[in-house]
Amino acid sequence: MKHMATYDLMETIRNTNEWMGASARAFASYPVWGMFPHPMFKVMSAWGRVTERSFARMVIKPDWGVRTVVGSDGRDHLVERVSEVSRPFGDLIRFKVHGREEKPRRVLLCAPMSGHYATLLRSTVASLLPDCEVWVTDWHNARDIPVSEGKFDIEDYTLYLMDFMRHLGPDTHVIAVCQPVPLALAATAYLAELEPAAQPRTLTLIGGPVDPDAAPTEVTDFGRRVTMGQLEHLAIQRVGFKYRGVGRLVYPGLLQLASFISMNGERHTRAFTDKISNEAKGEATERDKHNRFYDEYLAVMDMTAEFYLSTVERIFKSREIARNAFVVDGHQIDFGKLDSVAVKVVEGSKDDISAPGQCLAALDLLTGLDASKKASHLEDGAGHYGIFAGKSWRNNIRPLVMEFMDTHAAPPPGKQARPNISLAASNG
């Protein structure tokens, strides 16, 4: 499986399906078929439009689409996306709102690197912007990163988060969603040992696998069943000749997408059947519910092989975070050293990816943290995506997170907030 030919074969299949969709759409849309009012041509055209769009989206990074925000003055303020720290494997971007006073809440949103782009948190960003200054970790597609840039595993990911926290300074509230939860916790604990003054004010952990064994799911069961050798053989490929990362070992996005869809195959089949039917009847629109969801869902990115394999081996199999045995850059992190950052855990009662209990295990690791700085919330009826997007997030979870930030916004006694130090200065 580790051959470029395999990677290029998948890309060839994707490209062929996109071409077939475009050809069917064009052929069935010829005006001459209007002389033969048979529904076959409308169905063929509809199938072509849906197929062409779906397979094209798989290699396109979605746009953030966050262009304005309503200020307290009732006016729309333009939002500019600025890259403040640029690194080979990911950038720290800011959603800068023009024409309004800077908000006191400074939020670093740690986006997952688990198959989809950071734009998966688009609605989360949009919900925070009216009341916060927002920064997001924007991870790059591994297929576009030259081999000369080296490796990127979970230790490098943790060090990136530490650098981003240093850049923003101590008056920061960190929110980690899903996959980065254990690594954001590790980065904060490492800062508590190395540079206590650089720690953020609060850390909110949303639906992440701190202890996968606390509540087994299909994801954790898969990790137990498959050996690392089998996983490397089945999942890892080399980037093909089409991209800048040619030769890099990755877990391809298209392979990840196939596994995502197989988990809910019947639901996805029904969704596309209904979409084709609506297109044929002329009832579909460009920005309908189906397109809004699948434009994001189908857009996948490659992960470096070392990041994927180290996540499975060290987070899920060896449970290094859960056992307080996580090593970064040769140093074993002690979560008990974290004693000033307030930590809040958010879980969904119907989360089938990171089940209730997996994220809550973080609070048991923080033996040096006072009980007044620990909090948790279980959102009844919410699934995995509901706890950071949608109605549950907007109406229930977001207000609680805001309240938690405000409660712990002041620096601890004896400690003063320091001015922001740029990453360049901190490294110099």
Image (cartoon, rainbow, N blue to C red):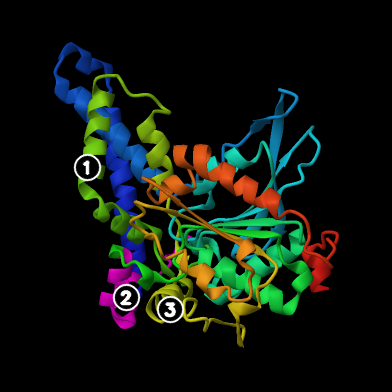
Rounded to the nearest angstrom, the CA distance separating label 2 from label 1 is 27 Å
Q: How many marks?
A: 3
User: What residue is shown at x 15% (from left), y 14% (from top)?
Assistant: 36
Q: Earlier in the sequence, mark 2 or mark 1?
A: 2
As helix, strand or loop, the secondary structure at mark 3 comes to: loop
Residue that label 3 marks = 319
The residue carrying pointer 1 sits among few (fewer than 14), some (14 to 19) or many (20 or more) residues within 10 Å by Cα, namely few
Q: SS at mark 2?
A: helix
Q: Is residue 240 magenta?
A: yes
First of labels 3, 1 by sequence position: 1
Camera-side residue of 109 and 344: 344
Residue underneath mark 1: 269
Amino acid on which the number 2 mark rests in the picture: Leu
Task: Give the CA distance from mark 3 to mark 2.
Answer: 17 Å
Q: Quadrant of residue 37?
A: top left
Q: Amino acid at mark 1?
A: Thr
How dense is the environment of label 3, judged by Cα within 10 Å: few (below 14), some, or many (20 and up)?
Answer: many
Discs 3/1, front: 3
Residue tagged 2:
231
Q: Quadrant of the N terminus?
A: bottom left
Which dot marks residue 165?
none
The residues colored magenta run: 219-243
